[in-house]
Image: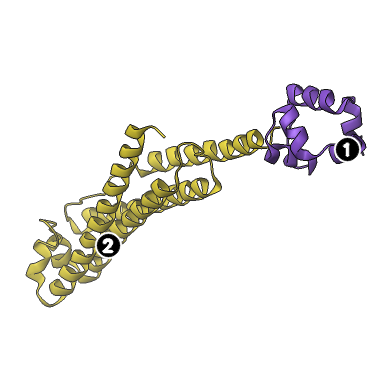
Amino acid sequence: MAIIVHLDVMMAKRKMSLNELSERVEVTLSNLSILKNGKAKAVRFSTLSAICNALDCQPGDILEYVE
Amino acid sequence: MNLKTEKLLKLMRFLAWIAFIGLLIKAGAIIMSFGVSVQNPEAATNLYQGMDLSRYANASFAHYTIIVFYYILLYLLQAYIALFITKLLSAINIEKPFTQTVVDLLNKIGYTILAVWILSIIHNAHVIGLEKYAEIDAAPFANEYIFLAGIVYVLAQLFKRGVVMQTENELTV
């Protein structure tokens, strides 16, 4: 069981690069890469809401729980 | 990093190096004096800076040899601890102090202090036994090493937890 991050899918749907997202949500590129590659241990609500705002989506579009 | 802390760490590292070299010299001097005392038993009265083990040499050469061996081992183990401390002070980074290297070094220091404690117990049992059966005045080693080993062990466990927390913090986006 794990949480899968679909950040790359949402970025592709919105045609947004990692650099652009990094500038919009004011999170460093390295931290966004950690999140995108599923290496993050935790996500702050402030970061999640900034990403949802930038990508115009819901948290469920980015995160998925699988058994 | 705070300039004062940085200077203090450098000074401590320098002192640890001095202690390491001093303890090696001490162990080396005892080995040399012991070698001399094998030929000339008079040398046992002053092995190193007034260390008089002639009472053991006069009673039994075998006991004398074992007791000198305890002293050499004690100083070598203390030198080993001093070496680990120099490594620890080089490895530590005040900005991010919780690293696996620091935990490993603290564990090694703790185990070496434990070895010193076991050595001091064996030495003390030996000399007290000699005092009882051969009526030689015993000069036991200090016995507080176990507390020091305990403190270092607790510190190592705290650092271990610190490594986990620091990693989690670094991987929080």
Q: Chain of mark 1?
A: A
Tell me the colour chain A is drawn in. Answer: purple
Instruction: List x then y, in percent, for residue B41.
Output: 10, 71
The kind of secondary structure element at disc 1 is: loop
Residue under circle 2?
B72
- The residue located at (53%, 40%) in the rendering is B98
The kind of secondary structure element at disc 2 is: helix
Pick the front one: B129 or B64 = B64
Give the residue type that dot 1 points to: Lys
In yellow, which chain? B
Residue A42 shows up from this direction: yes
Residue under circle 1?
A15
Circle 2 packing at 10 Å, graded few (<14), some (14-19), many (20+), is many
Residue B119 shows up from this direction: no
Give the residue type that dot 2 points to: Ile
Q: Are marks 2 and 1 in contact (CB under 8 Å)?
A: no
- The residue located at (51%, 45%) in the rendering is B103
Q: Quadrant of residue A4?
A: top right
In this picture, is B19 found above or below B151? below
Circle 1 packing at 10 Å, graded few (<14), some (14-19), many (20+), is few
Instruction: List x then y, in percent, for residue A35.
Output: 76, 38
The residues bearing labels 2 and 1 have C-alpha atoms spaced at a distance of 72 Å
Q: Quadrant of residue B133?
A: bottom left
In this picture, is A42 found above or below B139? above
Instruction: List x then y, in percent, for residue B165.
Output: 61, 34
- The residue located at (76%, 35%) in the rendering is A20
Q: Is residue B148 left or right of residue A18?
A: left
